[in-house]
Each structure stands twice: as structure tokens, then as C-alpha cells.
Image (cartoon, rainbow, N blue to C red):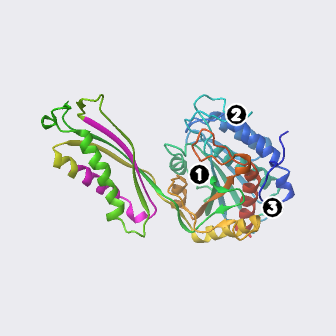
Amino acid sequence: MVSTFPNTTPVDLSQIRLAIRSLQPQLVEWRRGLHQKPELGFKEKLTAEFISQKLQQWGIEHQTGIAQTGIVAVIKGNQLSSEKVLAIRADMDALPIQELNEVPYRSQHDGVMHACGHDGHTAIALGTAYYLHQHRDSFAGTVKIIFQPAEEGPGGAKPMIEAGVLKNPDVDAIIGLHLWNNLQLGKVGVRTGALMAAVELFNCTILGKGGHGAMPHQTVDSIVVAAQIVNALQTIVARNVNPIDSAVVTVGKLHAGTTHNVIADTANMNGTVRYFNPALAGFFKQRVEQIIAGVCQSHGARYNLEYWSLYPPVINDAGIAELVRSVAQEVIETPIGVVPEFQTMGGEDMSFFLQEVPGCYFFLGSANQALDLAYPHHHPRFDFDETALAMGVEIFVRCVEKFFS
């Protein structure tokens, strides 16, 4: 059996109830088992089988095969004072990354890795389901636990919603967490309003006219055009967006040319746009194309542009965010434990759930430098302090109890 908690734990665990502390070895065991068998979006068959087996073993009502591999478990409290429904969401997919960690539980699937903590999210949700089922007398109402596929892409939240996971019974509110190595273990990031950014993507091909590198007057240099587009795109945030509204335009990939003395006839660029303010939806698509079209016209080049929205911004409801904040302060018990106004330009399809019902998504710190567990998300050496697993269960359980009280 694995140890209950790491040897170096920089937080006071006294507020984690004994029943959840005693669950910690199982949480670690489940998480490490999931870590060894990571699966990409909509391919989480082994993961879904493991979750379903556990829920069936515990006698928890659940439905499988939602949006291909998703699962929804339903736990009804024995107190009859509330008809409300609270949902808890956990994503369960991995990333196409080759793991470099030398640990006994490293990925056994070549080129696939849990490099973002979704194995931990699944373990926390399982632990929450187990505890709530064993303590049904402690809360009223109904809890739906949603195990969602494909958060990393192409997105499993929307098809799960379309499949009716927020209906029958209708969900009144939803919460979810993300283990976060940008926060030290023992800290929680939560805020009202925009927590994470909208994610929009674009692919663009510049169509010029190739030729000899020594005779540029006979060509339309796609590289020169692309370079000017990259620079011009930065003016969108600098000069077209209100400085109070944070936004990012990033060209992450630019490819053109074959050798030293040939002017490339085509250049390909891929990029992403991020913003918090929902009112900016549609603005960037229009402005990006205006800039690309203008630069191309000035050089006699043409272009093909694909632009699409992946996820809207994650917008937390004020009331549910306050619920999570108050619970986190009870569990952490330090003024600096809850980080105010915490935000990131990362994106998440939890946003689709939050468009449908009031809710709150929050970050649970999982980094521990003393144990060399502080590599960033999506890094091939990403790992986290597993103490956060029991902390996550404690926060979820208290949110359930407080929501129905």
C-alpha cells in the first residue's frame, strides 16, 4: 500500500476529516493506476471501465457511454429537505506526450501521458462519490458526478450537455476543480466572473510567388508577407482592445521555405487568440482577417484563412464562487490560502457547463518544490503532490453539504 501522505507536506491537514484522510491511500492508488494507462479524448475506454467498475462495486447508480466514453453517477442524500441538484465535473483524458518521469507509475502507453492532472481529477471525483454514498445521511438533495471525456480536444463538455447530462433531474448548479502546479500545495485560486479565457484558433496559408533568392523583384515573397502579418497581429491587443480587457494573440507556428536561395511561394502559420470578456466574441476573427487581407493586398499576395472558436471563457457565478471560497477557507485555514482574483489565459470546456447553469470552477494548488513536483502542465515531467487528492475530496464534500444546508 502506498504511503498516506508525502514525507514533505507544507500544509496543515488537520481540517481534512479522518474518513477522508483514511481514503488517501486509495486515492493515490486509483490516480497512479489511471496514470499508467492514459488515453486520449473520446478513447478513454479503460478509464471509463475502471470508473464504472468502482461505481458498480459501491452500488452507485450511474450511466455509461455518454458522448462515447462519458459517465454520470447519481447520489441521492437521505435527508428529504431539498430537491436541488448539484453537479461535480471531472475530466479524464490525457495528452499526446511521451512521459519522461522515472517513477513506478509512469505511463505504459507510448506517446500518451497524463500531463495535466486529469488522472487526479478522476481520482478526486471517485473519492467524492465514495464518501458521499457512504455518508448519504449527511446531506439533502442529489449530486450528479460527471466524468467527462476529451477536455484537451476536441471537447467533451458540449456533447455531454447535448446528451442531456444536466437534465433528469435538472442540475441547479455545478462545480469543478483543476489541480494546478502554478499554485503551491495549500492554496486555492477562485474568483467571481472570468477565471479562464476563451480559446480561438486560426490557420492561415499565404500564397505568394516563388523564385530565385537573388531575383526578388520577380517574386511575391510569402515569408516577408507572413513576417509583417505576425507583427501586425500584435497591434490588435495593443491598439484595438480596451487596455482594461486582457487579451492575447499568439502565432505559435510559422513554416515556409526549403533552402537558402529560394524565395518561398507559400507560408503557413497557426495561432491562438485568448480573451476574458465575452463581448469580444467575433471581434478577433474579423480583425485578424482584416489585417491578413490588408497586408496580402499591399504585397500582391493571396491567402486562405481558417478561424474557429474552441471554447468560450470560463465565467463563474458569484454565489457559487462564494460557496467554494468559503469552503476553501475552512479547509485551508490561512488568509493567504485562498488566492484572490486568480486568473489564467488557459482555456477549458468547463465553460460550456457554466453557460447552462450557475457554477464555479477553481484551481487547487498541487506544486511542491521540495519534492520536485513543480513542472508546468503539459510538460513531459509533469507530476503533482498527491496530498492535493484528499484536499480536493474534502472541498467537494463540504461544498455539497453547504450547498444543500
Image coordinates for residue 235, horizontal then vertical, percent: 32, 59
Sooner in the amino-acid sequence: mark 1 or mark 3:
3
Marks 2,3: beta carbons within 8 A: no
Depth check, front residue: 135 or 344: 344
Sooner in the amino-acid sequence: mark 1 or mark 2:
2
Q: Amino acid at mark 3?
A: Asp
Assign the C terminus to one quadrant of the image.
bottom right
Which residue is depicted at the point 59% across and 67% down?
191
Task: Write down the quadrant of residue 94 in the picture.
Answer: top right
Asked whether residue 265 is drawn in magenta, I would say no
Depth check, front residue: 267 or 204: 267
The boundaries of the magenta stretch are 266-293
Which disc number belongs to residue 235?
none
Residue carrying label 1:
165
Residue carrying label 3:
12
Task: Judge left or right: residue 245 versus residue 118.
Answer: left
Residue carrying label 2:
102
Of circles 2 and 3, which is in front? 2
Assign the N terminus to one quadrant of the image.
top right
